Amino acid sequence: MFEQAFKNIDDVLWKEAGCTTELDYTEQTSWLLFLKYLDGLEQDRADEAALNGKKYAYILDKPYRWEIWAAPKGKDGALDHNAALTGDDLRDFVNQKLFPYLHKFKEKATGPNTIEYKIGEIFGEIKNKISSGYNLREIIDHVDELRFRSQTEKHELSHLYEAKIKNMGNAGRNGGEYYTPRPLIRAIVRVVNPKIGESVYDGACGSAGFLCESFDHMKSSGKLTTKDLTTLQTRTFYGKEKKSLAYVIAIMNMILHGIEAPNILHTNTLTENLGDIQEKDRVDVILANPPFGGKERKEVQQNFPIRTGETAFLFLQHFIKMIKAGGCRDAQVPAGRHGRRCIGGGGRGGVVIKNTFLSNTDNASVSLRKLLLESCNLHTVLDCPGGTFQGAGVKTVVLFFEKGAPTRKVWFYQLDPGRNLGKTNPLNDDDLAEFVKLQKTFADSPKSWSVAAKSIDPATFDLSVKNPNGGEEVTHRSPEEIMDEISRGDAECAEVLGRIRKLI
């Protein structure tokens, strides 16, 4: 039933001139889903208060509640067509009254992690793109068929919503930046293995895939107490997202996964000065796929000791600073030809980054590799094949590291599914099963090997993926990546020349 409702919504949105892509479909579905969810949440809270003999203070004033303006019901439980707005009246109410009213919630919220603040953020950033009030009425009627009251209903809706996000990621344009393949996320989460009581953070959370998968992973770790569930709901998952659409999707995705008040901030993480991060701000686990290829402004670069315009490199510095320092605890790999290596003690991370980070010769890349190897134990590098990310030609690696001790040995795994990956043949969980298994003991195989830190060139800190077992050496860059580096070099030269001219 839910699947048909989603399809019906898309069919109506297809008729709207203002909705031309999967991004638009997801955005417009999201704000309506959020209001429908909020209505159910308020009803649940009101019922609970009534059972306890208390009066519930509604978040929304009566005219702006879903049950009043969107889906007023008659005594028979069916839509009251006489009371329900439609046509121009509905469109004008949404654009001129509902959205401005909801946007004001940001001003009166007590803090950024409240549901009131999130209401204000969402409806201050996105706009209603459904210009026909008759189409809007039809979509609202389909949304009203959805229910969020039981865990089973939320579970089904979360799968449908994830499918919508995936379609958006595959649709091209900017969709891919919101979507990291879930099999890859699940493998990263299994290796990093966040535990209940630890804080999990993603400073570039996109659609919150890492946070949602971590929640599912931790929830399935065994029989949870009421205290455990409260901890997962309120004090475990933290995210930041710069883009408005991604922020809305992240909030909705986490809600559908069962986190009622997600700790997601709508902000540009990179505007924070690294020097201002204190011990109280640090987290146990960082899981992220930060945007790469971006060009950050000079004033943003001033916040970082290693200055570069490459967005992903700034994020990596932020993540290293944000992780709690720790030492080895009890998770030891047995001694042997691989030596003893510790994982699981202290703060740790799994971060996706362009594979050119491992070998770029510019000063920022070299300095950042040096920082990573000397301040963290970079114990694992997962090399991903082309096609892992749909619609993106860049090749990526995943860096797994633990903060608190320098790197002694790096274990590489070259992922090779044995086929070309693409939209019709995407990465799956089975493709990553061997990696997850071998990584536990850093085992050698035709696809995996170890490199001692002392053998890494101290001048370049080059970490190129060179499989000693005869596998492909994946240090070659695409023409686009080479041109991108040339453009960066040209920009740096222009900046230097500009400074020289000013001096002259």
Image: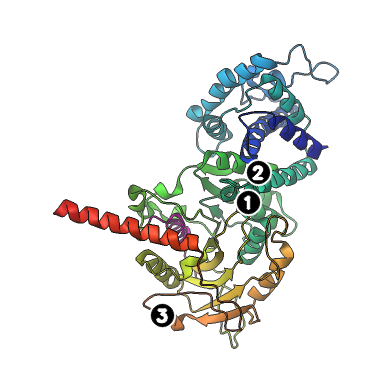
* Marks 1/2: CA–CA distance: 8 Å
Q: Residue at x 56, y 44 (%)?
A: 263
Under mark 1, the amino acid is Gly
Dot placed on the residue nearer the N-terminal end, 1 or 3 = 1
Which residue does the numbered mark 1 point to in the structure image? 209
Give the magenta-colored segment's residue range. 309-328
Q: Is residue 276 left or right of residue 111?
A: left
Give the SS element for disc 3: loop
Taking the magenta stretch, the answer to whether it contains residue 313 is: yes
Give the SS element for disc 1: helix
* Marks 1/3: CA–CA distance: 36 Å
Front residue of this view, candidates 470 and 107: 470
Q: Residue at x 59, y 85 (%)?
A: 335
Of circles 1 and 3, the one toward us is 3
Image quarter of residue 420: bottom right
Asked if residue 80 can be seen in this view, the reply is yes
Q: x, y percentage for residue 148?
A: 75, 36
Image quarter of residue 156: top right
Of circles 3 and 2, the one toward us is 3
Dot placed on the residue nearer the N-terminal end, 1 or 2 = 1
Which residue does the numbered mark 3 point to in the structure image? 457
Up/down of 340 relative to 85, above or below: below
Under mark 3, the amino acid is Asp
Q: Residue furthest front?
A: 479
